[in-house]
Image (spheres, rainbow, N blue to C red):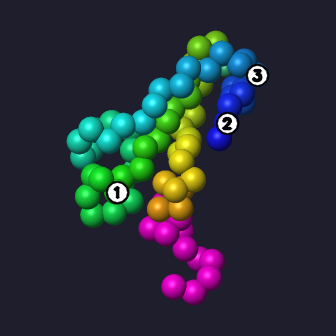
Amino acid sequence: VKTTATCPKCGSHELIRIPGSTRAFGTGNNIPAGMTIFSSVKVARFLCSHCGYSEEWVESPADIEKLRKKYGGSEGAG
Ligand SMILES: [Zn+2]
């Protein structure tokens, strides 16, 4: 988890954290990782208040694991 985020563009530490949400399918900031909205993972967005650069991070290790199973999974045998 990135606690001291730094803008990769300008090096500013003035990043605004915008939490992800799964309010309804297709809205909010999330990635589908299953059949229902309940299995979507939340994606937090960090916006640099200095230059306007934005970056998205999946913050939960469990959510990253869900995405790895759905979209990745080249490692190991299923
Ligand atoms: Zn910046």
Q: Secondary structure at mark 3?
A: loop
Q: Quadrant of residue 51?
A: top right
Q: Was residue 48 drawn as part of the magenta stretch in this picture?
A: no
Q: Which residues are magenta?
A: 67-78
Q: CA distance from mark 1 to mark 3?
A: 34 Å
Question: In the image, 37: left or right of 40?
Answer: left
Which of disc 3 and disc 2 is earlier in sequence?
2
Q: Residue at x 55, y 43 (%)?
A: 59
- Which picture quadrant has residue 46? top right
- Residue pointed to by mark 1: 39
Q: Is mark 2 within 8 Å of ligand 1?
A: no
Ligand 1's image quarter is: top right
Q: Does residue 51 appear anywhere in the picture?
A: no
User: What is the x, y in percent for residue 12?
Assistant: 72, 18
Q: Are marks 1 and 3 in contact (CB under 8 Å)?
A: no
- Is 78 on the left-hand or right-hand side of 37? right
User: Mark 3 or mark 1, which is nearer the start of the sequence?
Assistant: 3
Q: Of helix, strand and loop, which one carries label 2?
A: loop
Picture quarter with the N terminus: top right
Identity of the residue drawn at 47% across and 41% down:
43
Q: Position of residue 73 (x, y in %)?
A: 55, 74
Count the marks: 3
Q: What residue is disc 3 on?
A: 11
The answer to which of marks 1 and 2 sits earlier in the sequence is 2
For image coordinates 54% across by 48% down, the residue present is 60
What mark, if any, has residue 2 been given in the picture?
2
- Give the x, y percent position of residue 61: 57, 53
The secondary structure type at the circle numbered 1 is helix
Residue 25 vertical position relative to residue 46 in the rendered view, above or below: below
Amino acid type, label 3: Gly
- In this rendering, the answer to whether 57 lies above or below 64 is above
Mark 1 and mark 2: span between their CA atoms? 23 Å
